[in-house]
Amino acid sequence: MINRLSRRSFARLFGTAVLAPTALATLSTTAQAEGTPSTPTARRFPQGFLWGSATASYQVEGAANEDGRGPSIWDTFSHTAGKTNNGDTGDIADDHYHRYKEDVQLMKALGLKTYRFSVAWPRVFPQGTGTPNPKGLDFYNRLVDELLANNIQPYCTLFHWDLPQALEDKGGWQSRDTSEAFANYAGYVAQHLSDRVKHFMTLNEMKSFVDIGYRDGRHAPGLTLSVDKVNQVRHHAVLAHGLGVQAIRAHAKPGVKVGLAENAEACAPIIETAEHIAAARKAMREENAGYLTAIMEGKYTDAYLAHHGANAPKFTVADMKAIGTPIDFVGLNNYTTTWVRADNSSSGYAVVPAPASYPHMMSPWLRVGPQGLYWGPKLIAEIWGFKEIYITENGASSTDTLTPDGHVYDSDRVMYLRNYLTQLHRAVSEGVPVKGYFCWSFMDNYEWADGYAYRFGLHYVDFQTQKRTPKLSAQFYKEVIARNGLA
């Protein structure tokens, strides 16, 4: 039908002015000359939006036995036969400890405005507590100075899973003492870095390191505890967060902001109707009851406690007050979406299971669901009234390979990032207060129990030579940063 319509008829039918080919060409040429996309649907992010990337200490640093660093639970776990893919360890990883200046130059070339790194607790306190190791802290001083010299804002995570083995030997996260040890460590690091670092995150993905490390046994320390003990570990993790926030505020220089980076369940309505949206809002609180909800509200929900009954965590009023210590921002690590539908049960919602055919990236757990970057921050802002949210991780796993001419054409990752960022733009365009986005990861690294099998990086790393090569996704992300948006 369209082929038979005149341009004027098409315009009358669809209410659109149809330009002649010469006019379209002129429009495109003018737009290119001005350095802007030719499409009128370009998706711009707010001025000052922070585009960043992220890594974690054990996954990139290497130098496992240098300058006084003590062993972590991941050193022990990865060196235990059968625990990681191919027996891979983080002994060398990306050798970032020695190559950080080279890596910062790659960040600068990418156009990053900010970089999220984590401090290795056993570098600073080899025994977890006691006498600090000045050489360990010196590395982070050098890294922060290098970032600032290249106009990249440092965002610091204080715990990204590498618990000092000395603390695990005393009970690890099963012990309340570890929560207090974390607070002392957090206060010490903040005291020494906060003259230059203005954003600190306490713990990264409590949900992951508790459930996978202490319940499922697939991550360090490789335990399979009973339900009541897992719940107590979970409580000690959120308590560590709360005590850590208090310690950072007590020791940091003025102007510092404190938050966390949690992989909260990003609940989304399976169909965007009023009843399913209401169900997603209920699910957001209850599906995150043991972590984010407890922190935001300073209490465990009635449903959470009732569900666990005699297995519920043991806690005091003082514990919950500490856990609910107000924070300045929320960091949301998001890779997937938890689909929710309305339900007649007492909870008012049901999680929609993923069928076997559901699309996912190379990691089986990484089910593609871009809507999580819309509904996750939107519901956090609506439910708890937050005014400063960051997407502290978002990325895609693949098995990238170099072509004979030395390129990595990771079109799958470009597709993934484009779709997720489109949903994030939808959120910010509606006023959801997302202030920045950190792509995971800056470069290929040690992917925990999966070793080096899966790659998440914007930069390809040859782990034999340590050569870094920007992938097609790095070119895409560089363009996003330069435009401050999507075409």
Image: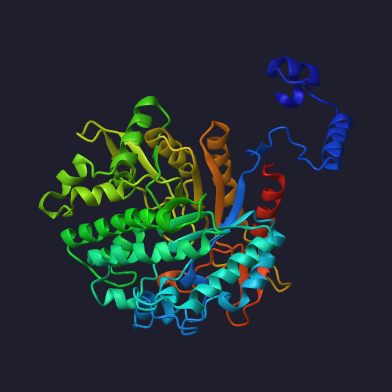
Residue 182 visible somewhere in the drawing: yes
In which quarter of the view is residue 162 placed? Answer: bottom left
Identify which residue is drawn at 72% across, 61% down. Answer: 109
In which quarter of the view is residue 112 placed? Answer: bottom right
Q: Is 156 above or below relative to 425? A: below
Q: Is 332 above or below relative to 73? A: above
* Residue 275: x %, y % from top left: 34, 27
In the image shown, does 2 or 225 lie closer to the viewer?
Answer: 225
Q: Is residue 288 left or right of residue 187?
A: left
| Tag count | 0
* Residue 264: x %, y % from top left: 38, 49
Q: Is residue 471 left or right of residue 390?
A: right
* Residue 179: x %, y % from top left: 29, 62
Q: Quadrant of the C terminus?
A: top right
Q: Quadrant of the N terminus?
A: top right
Q: Is residue 361 left or right of residue 283?
A: right
Residue 290 visible somewhere in the drawing: no
* Residue 34: x %, y % from top left: 84, 40
